[in-house]
Amino acid sequence: MEAERQGLMNGDYIFFLVQHFEDNLWKYALNNRINQAAIKAFEMAFVIGQKSYEGYEYYDFFDQVSPYSAYLHDAVLLYAMGLKEVLKDGKDPHNGQELLTRLKNKHNIRFYGASGLVHFDEDGERNLDYSIYDLQHIGDATKFVPVLNYESQSKTVRATAMFPSMIWPKGKPPSDNPECGFNNELCEWLTNDIALLTLLVSFPFIGVIAVLCIGVLVLQKLRLQTKLDDSCWWLISYSDITIIRDPTATRAISLSTTASHSGSGGSQSNFSNNSYGLKDKTGKENVFASLGLYQGNQVAIKYLKDHMGINVQKPSLIAEFNQMKEMKHENLVQFFGVCNEPPNVCLVMQYCRKGSLKDIFASDAELDSMFKFSFAYDIVNGMEFIHKSCMKFHGNLKPSTCLVDSRLQIKLSGFGLWEFKNTPKKKIASLETPNYEEMYWTAPELLRQVGHHCYGTPKGDVYSFALIIDCYAAEDSFPRRTSTSNLSEQLCEENINSVLRACWSENPDHRPPFGSIRRQLKETSPDSHANILDNMVDKLEKYANHLEEVVEERTNQLTAEKARADRLLSSMLPRPADGGRSVEPRSYELVTIFFSDIVGFTSMCSVSSAMEVVTFLNDLYSLFDDIIKMYDVYKVETIGDAYMVASGLPIVNENKHAIEICTMALHFMTVIKDFKIRHMPYESLAIRVGIHSGPVVAGVVGTTMPRYCLFGDTVNMASRMESNSLPLKIT
């Protein structure tokens, strides 16, 4: 059935199923008359099994017992027949060899048992007869029938009467050989086409393989070259360096190196830039350097005088160069390599635009405490990294080796490469003509070891650092060993005095490590751990944040004042006018006008002071103002003791204006009975009220102190109604 699903039952293939004994396989096929898929699947399948004999009625018996019982039955029967032959010949029936001898072919024991023909050849192997069964439709039944029989004794195959009834899907049996043979030997044209197609496909594939092989070879060569270059990364050809002789032409920024070095064949420049150059105290800009370009980087070139080149492949020199490769830190100058081509033997290093501390001390630049602490912290940071590295010490720490980059950050230089820089000839020259100026920065214990070729120690670096800090107090390129009190005045801090005294100690063991110095600096100035540019940015950020707070505070105040002014304007003018827009005069068909005045106001004024009258009116009208907020009315004005209110304008409220005014007037009458005059608490207060409804014209009059005024007979009538009204009455 799986072959049917895969499309193999199209007549090109036949399938053989081998059965070693008769079981329920064909009985299932015989009885399965409703499973058409199974019947169709068996149409191209043949079953090879033992020959079944007609009239042998054991099928019902096999339904009740195992099929292996047939073999047991035949084995017992065979044993009985063999035992009969042994007894017949008078032999010992207990002798198994005698029994086996008589069961072989020469005694011709042959019978049909439950499992079929039972017969043995001379070797004792059983000969079985086999049949090939085909599924055929006979009448209404579908069952397996034998179409070929194989007889083991004669070793022949005979067709049965059902053989001609076999039905093939394509009308004939499938060929036992493919059309072109198993090796396409019968289709030479197809073989040639396949060969051509294979050739066409192979050529691109071979080409791709060839390209890959070439790529691998090139990659290996590049890796080998890279490995070779990495091993000599520090060796620079002088032709690869572009010397910049006119920095202003290339818009280069001014350069100051550690000292004024120039060598034979080397280029010495004397230049500055107005934006970045440093001026000395005489006002003259003097910046000495050799500037160049290497691999797109602006570099400083330090020529080594009287250096004729040495064997740079010595293991000790290679170790020095590899040490320099590992010295990467934000406070160390980057080392690019060396040129070992006399007379242009030089060191190529990172270019620092602001020169060195020596240049800054020689200029008229004034440093505040932020600069001083930041520079000190940068030096300590770089020295701490050097002491923890494989180099262990600097050995040449002084203001001229403390370079300053464009970000005003200290970068240390002048360390390492002792064997390369100090050739035997140069060592002899230094002993004959010592440079006392350079020796000033050297620790006392190292000065006493002249001739022993000791390049430096960590404790000696601490001593040199203390002298550099002393430059801050001396404000000179050549400091004096001043007292710490002078230094304290310059740095305005007391807690570093003990540290500096320890750094100047004659006993190296009493000098603190740079880690301790860094902690003291951080405690003294928490901002010193950041460079100057970061400090400036931080201060600008703080100032900007403070400015934002001030602006926000002022904005809130302005908003509050504006809201207060808006409320005042809205109480004086209608909304269009208080919004800055002009109010066009408008005619209202029907509004209600309210007028009131105080009974006996003139007599009260004659016995009261002006301040008492103002206080009285303010108390009364404030009470009225609180009441009118509850109604849909608009306060027009107050003149003396007169209080004027209108409803139905400036916002029309249809026919509610009379109700609003009348209700408000009743409210006034209610509260006026309980009103107390401050300066006349025992006097009763009474008002007269006049109300009238009718058409009016309203508009804002004037631009200076504008007023919202009402015009028309309705206003006059309301005023007359009030004049003719009685105390505590509404007319």
Image (tube, helix red, strand yellow):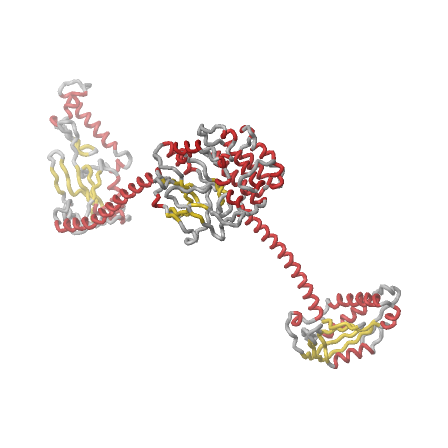
Nearer to us in this view, 664 or 26:
664
Quadrant for residue 82, please give it: top left
Residue at 72 percent of width and 69 percent of height? 631
Residue 46 in picture, x, y percent from top left? 20, 43
Does residue 673 show up?
no
Q: Is residue 665 above or below residue 417?
A: below
Residue 500 visible in the snapshot: yes
Q: Is residue 269 left or right of residue 17?
A: right
Is 310 situated left or right of 650 in this image?
Answer: left
Q: Is residue 124 left or right of residue 313?
A: left
Query: Could you say where residue 547 lies in the image, as x and y percent from the top left?
Result: 61, 54
In the displayed structure, 644 sits above or below 400; it is: below
In the depicted view, which residue is nearer to us: 495 or 281?
A: 281
Q: Position of residue 415 (x, y in %)?
A: 45, 37
> Quick one: quadrant of the C terminus?
bottom right
Q: How many marks?
A: 0
